[in-house]
Amino acid sequence: MAVTTHGVTGNVTTNAATYATGNVGQAVNDLLVTFALVTGTADAGDMTDSQGGSWTQITTAVKAASADKLWCFIRNARCPNADPLTVTMDVTGDNGTGCIIFVVRVSGMSRVGANAARQSAVQSNQAGATTPAPVFGAAVLTGNPTLGFVGNATNPAGMTPPASWTELVIDVGYATPTSGGEYVTRDSGFTGTTITWGSTSASAFGDIIVELDTSVPPGRPFKLASQGGGLVGPPGRLAA
């Protein structure tokens, strides 16, 4: 079973093009998932890390009349080691005014990058005094983890997690401009479509939810042998 663990939080008010976290503290073969909020940017956004890993943007949302952006990224390879690793959010095309990053470690995953996300959903530009309740397009598979992220204009975010979901780290925020963020996870057992937070947001917000895919990718397809003819399967196996 896949298990989610908090990696590291980045939370800073800075007018900058890039925002780096501290060390993630990952284990070998962890898959990393990130949620980020950057205020004051319309940049497409990119994610990098100090070990040269590439990342896939899974989805994005906006809040505060589209002035602030939220993202979810998944690393395109599992972590090869436990050496110090930091993650950087890049908005070089349009500097932000501050950033919140949550890095989530997920053990027990075979799939990576876009292939690791079965589905995602967002809500953008939601009014304050309403409850985040994003809706997946299909029912979640019970063995798959689900993760959710809310970014709002409250410091700290002040959100109550959905029933049966866990806050792996407390809400955070910064003061200029006033912003907050919270993420939640549930490792298994959800089979619905709507994830409803346990409280309203005191301010305008956006949110993202993601279902990870814990299935094992199929093996390599059979192909013609490079010499000698015949068909071969994956290494160590002969085709029937």
Image (cartoon, helix red, strand yellow):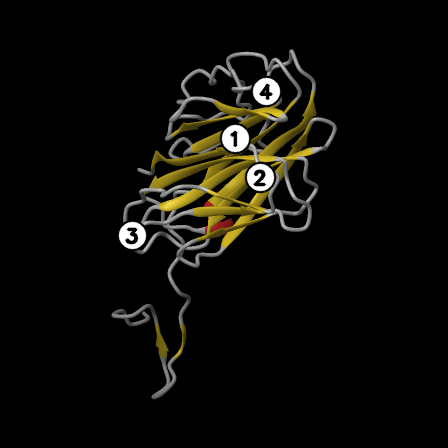
Q: In which quarter of the image is the N terminus?
A: top left
Dot 3 surroundings within 10 Å: few (below 14), some, or many (20 or more)? Answer: some
State whether residue 38 appears in this view: no
Query: What label does residue 83 carry, if any?
Result: 3
SS class, disc 1: loop
Nearer the N terminus, badge 1 or badge 3?
3
Nearer the N terminus, badge 2 or badge 3?
2
Q: How far apart are marks 2 and 3 (CA)?
A: 26 Å
Query: What label does residue 139 carry, if any?
Result: 1
Residue name at image x 50 percent, y 42 percent:
118
SS class, disc 4: loop
Q: Looking at the picture, which amino acid does disc 3 mark?
A: Asp
Dot 4 surroundings within 10 Å: few (below 14), some, or many (20 or more)? Answer: many
SS class, disc 2: strand
Q: Which of 147 and 239 is in front in this view?
A: 147
Question: Which residue sits furthest bottom?
Answer: 228
Question: Which residue sits furthest left?
Answer: 236
Query: What label does residue 132 carry, if any?
Result: 4
Image vertical order of residue 48 relative to residue 230, above or below:
above
Q: How far apart are marks 2 and 4 (CA)?
A: 16 Å
Nearer the N terminus, badge 3 or badge 4?
3
Image spot of residue 73 (x, y percent): 52, 44
Q: Which of marks 2 and 1 is in front?
A: 2
Image vertical order of residue 120 relative to residue 109, above or below:
above
In the drawing, does residue 173 fall left or right of residue 202? Answer: left
Q: How far apart are marks 4 and 1 (CA)?
A: 18 Å
Q: Which of marks 2 and 3 is in front?
A: 3
Q: Looking at the picture, which amino acid does disc 2 mark?
A: Trp
